[in-house]
Amino acid sequence: MHNFDFVSPSTVEEAAAALQGDEAQALGGGQTLIPTMKQRLAAPTTLVSLTGIAGMSGVSSDGGALTIGGATTHATVADQAGAYPALAALAGGIGDPAVRNRGTIGGSLANNDPSACYPSAVLGSGATVVTNTREIAADDFFDGMFTTALDEGEIITAVRFPVPQAASYQKFLQPASRFALTGVFVAQYADGVRVAVTGASEGGVFRWSEAEAALSADFSAGALDGLSVSADGMIGDLHGTPEYRAHLIKVLTKRAVSAAA
Amino acid sequence: MPKDSGIGASSKRREDVRFLTGNGNYTDDININGQTYAHFIRSDVAHGTINSINTAAAEAMDGVIKVFTAADFAAAGGIPCGWQITDRDGNAMQEPKHPILAEGKVRHVGDPIAVVVAETLEAARDAAEAVEIDIDELPAVIDMKAALDDGATKVHDDLTSNLCFDWGFVEENREAVDAAFAEAAHVTSLDLVNNRLVANPMEPRVAIGDYNRSDDEYTLYTTSQNPHVIRLLMGAFVLSIPEHKLRVVAPDVGGGFGSKIYHYAEEAFCTFAAKVLNRPVKWTSTRAEAFVSDAHGRDHVTKIELALDADNKFTAIRTETYANMGAYLSTFAPAIPTWLHGTLMAGNYTTPLIYVNVKAVFTNTVPVDAYRGAGRPEATFQLERVIDKAARELGVDPAELRRQNFIKPDQFPYATPVAVEYDTGDYDATLDKVLELGDYNGFAARAAESAANGKLRGIGLANYIEACGIAPSNLVGQLGARAGLYESAKVRVNATGSISVFTGSHSHGQGHETTFAQVVADMIGLPEDQIDIVHGDTSKVPMGMGTYGSRSLAVGGSAMVRATEKIINKAKKIAAHLMEAAEDDIELKDGQFSVAGTDKSVAWGDVTLAAYVPHNYPLEDIEPGLEETAFYDPANFTYPSGSYLCEVEVDPDTGTVDVVAFTAADDFGNVINPMIVEGQVQGGLAQGIGQALRESAVYDDNGQLLSGSFMDYAMPRADDLPNLVVDHSSCTPCTHNPLGVKGCGEAGAIGSPPAVVNAVLDALNRAGHKVDHIDMPVSPARVWAAMNS
Ligand SMILES: Cc1cc2nc3c(=O)[nH]c(=O)nc-3n(C[C@H](O)[C@H](O)[C@H](O)COP(=O)(O)OP(=O)(O)OC[C@H]3O[C@@H](n4cnc5c(N)ncnc54)[C@H](O)[C@@H]3O)c2cc1C
């Protein structure tokens, strides 16, 4: 690891100002960033810690929406997002206790790992990503593997989830990392069903629109029977071929619907 | 009644107190005044020509002491190989030089090119980024068969090809084996891969070199399974340091599984650099470095054929194996696919004719050497897979086909057609035991229950035999070993009666400090806490060939028994003198010497005190003191055996395999500490199940290790395993060592992979999927692909 300065601001404004510095970078739980720095693949000169900012941590519920502070740990979401059980369960299934006690929702979304869990919940819920400068709809936020709509130095301060009538996240574990080899988040709202898929596509998290249409008409596993996902553009690696991932998407979507219904 | 101490007692592991409370003394815990830090710069390409290395900028940086390259080692030897194989034509294997730092060429990702030594590790790592290395990349040789094509790129320019050796065993049987196949009523053949593994012990490797100018003595602290072997190899072959000027210490070592047997470049580097710099030099491997610098294991590609007669008796076995050596020959590499593999191809069966062909191949990958089981898992996997396939083809019960071909208890000692003689065994007994404990007959009901839950259930069996307790020195000498494989022990009885045992065996998780003390305590009749086991330091222990091949108790323990017998004999002489009785009448029981038929007795401590305070002592007959050394060279290998039964559930939607039950019935001969044996088997099973379902070191065509971290290399975890049922009540003691022990360290890893794979294939075939084989790791994706092809 290279040397760096560490600042721990107490307001979002101070953090945003600190992030204007040359080679400054936000630090959430450090579960992704610190290992990268230890491997010398990243060498920010200043780390701006977000976890000490009052108001950026915690879960609040209000009129059908659940708002989670951008620096809220996975463990806190697992514990306190009872109003949205599928989301709490997703957070409780990330990594191990050490990772969940440090890692944050803002860090996970900003990183947008193609195998991460949270992006599927955000996209599958049509959530809103709130930053220090604007609000970004989920559909506009994710921009392919490891890329998002965030500007340089922009801070995710909160994420607002509309609470669905029913939802479920089904994660198929990659055997080594236990990230999602493929994961599917299904959420049913009054105005339709959303299906978001993580871990599978070279384009990162995406919505399976045919399944959404079928499930919006008939929210049952059987509604998916005739559908299939093309292997084109799916990830192929040590742990699974594109065909296998395409197949898993359908299996997991069915399981999610059965679990939610 | 279970005993509560001595042989047969499940004494608690005394070493766990320090391990579990953070008080272990591992190599990285050692820090020497004035110590410097070494950082290895390693190749990030698999194959290339080094055009230039410019160290000037790095050497000018703050805190940097020196940057070493191959030029600094011009006078040093290469890392030696400890075993020479003779090929089918009687020629010695091709043996390339293995330099400490790359000379002109890099040959695998991770091959060390230069080393920065600095005041701090961070300074060394910073400076490493300033070392300019210009490499022209060459095509990487990765696939073993392609490596043997005419005109293939050569890993070593000075060798004639990438073929290290082409070995035939037993070459004289070749034609008879072919003839048996021509006459066979049925032939089953199978192509399979034994997947390459990374040992991944919990503690990565560490080396600290220290040099003392005043007496010209070197000390190397290292994470080794055999410090004396390192002293011999490094002193004699690499650095030309006489053994009396070189001390090697391997303190607490956090697991090895074979990967810490070998002499590694980092050890020689730190020892050498310590003198050059006149400062201690420390290197601690990162996990990422371990993946590309610890020797890997397995990596065989095999075709096996089994011939059967009309009565389903095995008549012949023929195999052809490509064994990956990696880029250089690691210490024992050539012995693994040959003598530790070919000699096991008879398994537990009476097959009269066997021919094994092994082509060892150089590739641009990390060197491959022994990993828990070493050659024997590869043999067992082939055999137990092909037998299962034969049973399916013939429509017979796989347990019965095996039983029908077993060597029967009255046939021992049994000479196999592959040059070994099994002393004892009872294969029906372990098979019966495992079928009973695993409720083989109740499988149908469990399968029906799984089916009701939408799962496919399968059951898989495997038997194994292994050759442990390595090894008779004269025999291995004939087979190409460049070392003997005896073991030493020194038993020092202190004046007040407590005992220090210095053993050449090294404990790195096996629990020797407990087990070995139990043996000596039992022989004399003392409380176990009166005995301390000392190991891992060449300045304390007379000599040692170390720990691997399940040899510690069978060979090291035997040496300890012999030394203790000498002690007892001498102590009896002293006791006889003290009690004015005839030596032949002296009995030792519970730490008391008595004269047979009388009530005269004298305590152990009185005798030991007399030995050191010899006022009333037979000085004309015996020397004072009570300390004895013994070397033990085994007469034969030991042959543990067993039967393993695995039950799996396969999720037909995803191909996920869940091991729902696993039963192991082993014959280890006599057992000193049942609890430790159970733990050894469980650990081996975890690794074997890991190999079968998860672990795999995979290179891409460019020689990049795709599974180079725990993000992609899938270690088995506790929640991947069912409750492991382990039984070792079947016992046919070894006939040629004093304890009657056979060794238990590798069994689990040897017998379990075929049991798991057989179970998966059983599940699929029962469900109507005609699948003959799935290569390990049997991942969900592979199972799904097999079901849908
Ligand atoms: C062993 C292990 C297992 C894991 N398993 C899983 C898993 O199963 N599923 C899963 O989804 N994830 C998994 N993760 C990843 C984990 O969820 C991390 O918490 C997450 O990827 C990063 O969050 P962080 O808070 O630690 O971010 P950091 O590492 O601190 O930062 C990551 C990136 O986000 C930026 N950043 C951080 N916070 C913000 C913010 N509020 N606004 C803008 N940018 C920000 C940083 O600058 C950096 O670029 C695992 C990680 C580990 C180490």
Image (tube, rainbow, N blue to C red):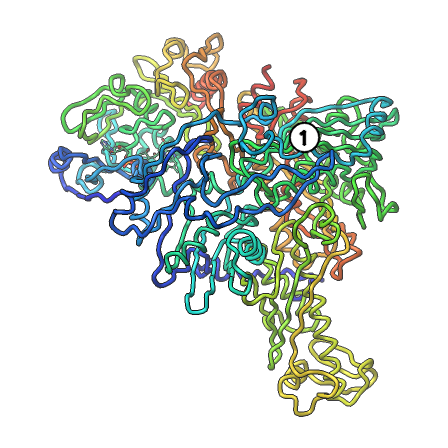
- At label 1, the amino acid type is Thr
From the image, tell me which residue sits under label 1. Answer: B321
Single out the residue that lies furthest toward the bottom. B615
Ligand 1 position by quadrant: top left
Q: Please tell me which residue is depicted at 45% across the width and 57% down the height of the picture.
A: B27
Q: Would the CB of label 1 be found within 8 Å of ligand 1?
A: no
Looking at the picture, tell me which residue is in the foreground, B180 or B576: B180
Quadrant for residue A6, please give it: top left
Q: Quadrant of the N terminus of chain B?
A: bottom right
Which image quarter is the C terminus of chain B in?
top right
Left or right: residue B353 versus residue B165 is right
In this rendered view, identify the residue nearer to me: A220 or B726. B726
Question: Secondary structure under badge 1?
Answer: strand
Can residue B57 be seen in this snapshot? yes
Residue A144, given in percent of the width and then of the height, sits at 31, 19
How crowded is the residue under tag 1: few (<14 C-alpha within 10 Å), some, or many (20+)?
A: many
Residue B369 location, quadrant: top right
For mark 1, name the chain: B
